[in-house]
Amino acid sequence: MAKILLVEDSEQIWDFLSRRLERRGHTVVMAHDGEQGVNSAKASAPDIILLDMNLPVMDGWTAAQAIKADPQTQKTPIIALTAHAMAGDREKTIQAGCDDYHPKPIDFTKLLEQIDALLKPAG
């Protein structure tokens, strides 16, 4: 199973996601702001990153760019988690360096499919 870095500042969302992902056998590493997320991406070497785009300290857009700019973490797939579901938002997250996009509220079944799709090439 995968090591997943979950970068999310909403306790309700990280509690929900971490418990459900762990029940499916994944290891979940938590970060609660963008700066912690960038540091955790380097320190924990996750297989995939779930990144909220609206974070304190450093926003998800900046964190995604920093992760993709670092040779140590640039190949780690990132799924943007965002309440921004307006036209063009998916493209903005991809331009920031995210590999996929998942609008909130989270559809857990669809999110699992996205995680599996991004892990298949590496695994």
Image: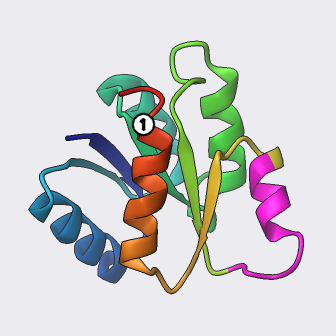
Tally of numbered tags = 1
Front residue of 114 and 94: 114
| Residue ID at (83%, 58%) | 92
Q: Which residue is mark 1?
A: 120
Q: Quarter of the image containing the N terminus?
A: top left
> Is residue 81 toward the left or the right of residue 41 in the image?
right
Q: Residue 38: horizontal and vertical position, in percent? A: 51, 36
The answer, for residue 107, to whether it is visible in the render is: yes
In the image, residue 84 above or below residue 90: below
What secondary structure is marked by label 1? loop
What amino acid type should be assigned to the residue bearing mark 1? Lys
Q: Which residues are magenta?
A: 84-94
Q: Is residue 66 magenta?
A: no
Quarter of image, res 66: top right
**Vertical order, 10 against 81 (above or below):** below
Seen at 77% across and 64% down, the residue is: 90
Give how far across and how far down residue 10 sits, in percent: 40, 76
87 in the magenta segment: yes
Residue at 45 percent across and 45 percent down: it is: 49
* Residue at the limit of the structure toward the right, as seen here: 88
Mark 1 Cα within 10 Å, few/some/many (few <14, many 20+)?
A: few
Residue 115 vertical position relative to residue 63 in the rendered view, above or below: below
Percent position of residue 54, x then y: 62, 68
Left or right of 19 on screen, residue 81: right
**Among the 4 quarters of the image, the one containing residue 4:** top left
Q: Residue at x 46, y 44 (%)?
A: 37
Q: Check the image and report above or below for 45 versus 92.
A: above
User: Quick one: which residue is furthest to the bottom in this view?
Assistant: 105
Nearer to us in this view, 73 or 75: 75
Location of residue 17 by image quarter: bottom left
Q: Give x and y (percent) for residue 80.
A: 60, 59
